[in-house]
Image (cartoon, helix red, strand yellow):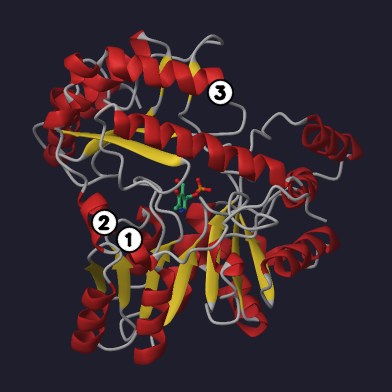
């Protein structure tokens, strides 16, 4: 829209819009905080979610190109109209077998999957209980459903129990690995509260799928809880390197969901070439446990090294390692110092984090080599006096984690064994 339309309307019809846009530019006069410098080939990149480094894998790319060449991409319509596609149904069955779920439904994105699932399960009579660090799409779904939505303190099963006692049973939403701070859900404790109170649990596995489990099946499956957790959901745009999402749950619910979730009704379906890509990705992800082991080993090394150098990353238990500088000015300083030394992370700030808890998030992936970890650690030593991690607010989740350190079951979360 040409700027003149906003300018002209400033005094009359849309003054509040004008104010909002002005506020944005006043807050970020030099460009938005998340926008750092573009990465080059010589940088160490930790900004994406391609944890298994499969985005350009020739086995996956080739399959998608072949599907393009077949010329079957004529599905330009909403998801509700294309449920008869054999190829999609086969993929959904394969996902279900992999996860140990009764059924799955392919969605256009993780956002659409979460929004649709919350919209289809909550409502004015069914409250939503959402971990305060859960993804925005979950809140969006509850809002669309007009459901009362209550945040409970991060990973705090007792707080959840008190909330449910006050407002009645409903739907509880958590993530198996939290996307900003990288800790695990205290799944046994949260599930116990759900079972005790009659609440229904949804676990977002977006950052665990592909990364956790002997065949990358995620935390729920790996802990043997597939029969007790009613719903799982995940984005296919992390370790699964495509654009899409998946909802897993009971077969009868899946059929209802296909026709009742608003993104399925009002947004176009996934294309056949994308489904071909997902098929190829699933085979690779299931089979290559050595990639999971590598991510796990490199992540452990980076977390330990950062802690030794005075960076409090104690909240992280996974490949997601946040440097929580706090105020945005401090995060900008950190981002610039890292980028000046060839380390590219992803900046997170409000509304993706609480205000004044902004961060640079480092995501470890198996495309890194040991020398990259050395480099990151050297850079973090070098810039320490400039960015002063000793002054950063201690991570709240870090403290919670220390208090509940025994809550994560002591199981081997990945395996070097090749899958099937
Ligand atoms: C935990 C979580 N759930 C859902 C989503 C949304 O996924 P998508 O990017 O596929 O829409 C994301 C991505 O940011 C995420 O981190």
Callout 2: SS: helix
Please tell me whether residue 364 is drawn above or below residue 405 in the rendered image: above
Please tell me whether residue 40 is drawn above or below residue 355 in the rendered image: above
Quadrant containing the N terminus in the rendered view: top left
231 relative to 271 in the view: left or right: left
Pointer 2: what residue? 402
Q: Distance between the residues labelled 1 and 3?
A: 28 Å
7 relative to 105 in the view: left or right: left
**Number of numbered discs visible in the structure rendering:** 3
Pointer 3: what residue? 370
Dot 3 surroundings within 10 Å: few (below 14), some, or many (20 or more)? few
Callout 1: SS: helix
**Counting residues from the N terminus, which is met first, the one under dot 1 or under dot 3?**
3
Q: In this orientation, does residue 207 appear?
A: yes
Query: What x and y, as percent, mark residue 295?
Result: 57, 39
The residue sitting at 48% across, 75% down in the picture is 120
Question: Front-most of 297 and 154?
Answer: 297
Dot 1 surroundings within 10 Å: few (below 14), some, or many (20 or more)? few
State yes or no: discs 1 and 3 in contact (Cβ < 8 Å): no
State yes or no: discs 2 and 1 in contact (Cβ < 8 Å): yes
Query: What x and y, as percent, mark residue 269?
Result: 66, 54
Pointer 1: what residue? 405
Query: What x and y, as percent, mark residue 300?
Result: 47, 39
Dot 2 surroundings within 10 Å: few (below 14), some, or many (20 or more)? few
């Amino acid at each position: 829209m040409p700027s003149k339309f906003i300018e002209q309307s400033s005094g009359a019809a849309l003054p509040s819009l004008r104010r909002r846009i002005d506020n944005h530019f006043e807050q970020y006069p030099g460009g938005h905080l998340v926008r750092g410098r573009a990465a080059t080939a010589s940088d160490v990149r930790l900004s994406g979610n391609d944890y298994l480094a499969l985005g350009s894998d020739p086995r996956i790319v080739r399959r998608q190109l072949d599907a393009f060449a077949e010329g079957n991409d004529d599905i330009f319509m909403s998801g509700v109209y294309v449920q008869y596609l054999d190829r999609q149904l086969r993929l959904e069955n394969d996902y279900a077998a992999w996860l140990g779920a009764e059924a799955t439904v392919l969605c256009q994105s993780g956002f659409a999957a979460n929004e649709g699932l919350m919209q289809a399960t909550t409502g004015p009579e069914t409250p939503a209980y959402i971990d305060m660090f859960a993804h925005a799409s979950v809140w969006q779904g509850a809002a669309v459903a007009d459901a009362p939505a209550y945040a409970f303190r991060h990973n705090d099963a007792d707080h959840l129990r008190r909330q449910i006692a006050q407002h009645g049973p409903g739907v509880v939403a958590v993530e198996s690995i939290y996307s900003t701070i990288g800790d695990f859900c205290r799944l046994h404790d949260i599930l116990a509260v759900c079972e005790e109170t009659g609440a229904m649990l949804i676990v977002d596995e977006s950052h665990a799928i592909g990364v956790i489990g002997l065949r990358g099946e995620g935390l729920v499956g790996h802990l043997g809880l597939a029969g007790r957790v009613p719903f799982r959901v995940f984005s296919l745009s992390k370790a699964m390197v495509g654009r899409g999402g998946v909802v897993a749950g009971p077969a009868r619910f899946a059929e209802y969901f296909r026709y009742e979730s608003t993104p399925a009704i009002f947004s176009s379906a996934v294309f056949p070439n994308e489904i071909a890509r997902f098929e190829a990705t699933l085979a690779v992800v299931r089979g290559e446990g050595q990639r999971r082991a590598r991510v796990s080993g490199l992540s452990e090394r980076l977390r330990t090294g950062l802690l030794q150098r005075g960076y409090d990353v104690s909240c992280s238990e996974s490949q997601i390692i946040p440097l929580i500088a706090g105020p945005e000015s401090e995060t900008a300083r950190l981002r610039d110092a890292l980028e000046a030394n060839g380390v590219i992370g992803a900046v997170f700030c409000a509304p993706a984090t609480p205000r004044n808890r902004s961060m640079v998030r480092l995501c470890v992936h198996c495309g890194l080599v040991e020398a990259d970890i050395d480099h990151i650690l050297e850079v973090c030593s070098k810039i320490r006096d400039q960015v002063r991690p000793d002054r950063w607010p201690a991570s709240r989740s870090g403290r919670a984690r220390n208090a509940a350190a025994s809550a994560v079951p002591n199981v081997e979360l990945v395996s070097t064994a090749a899958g099937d």
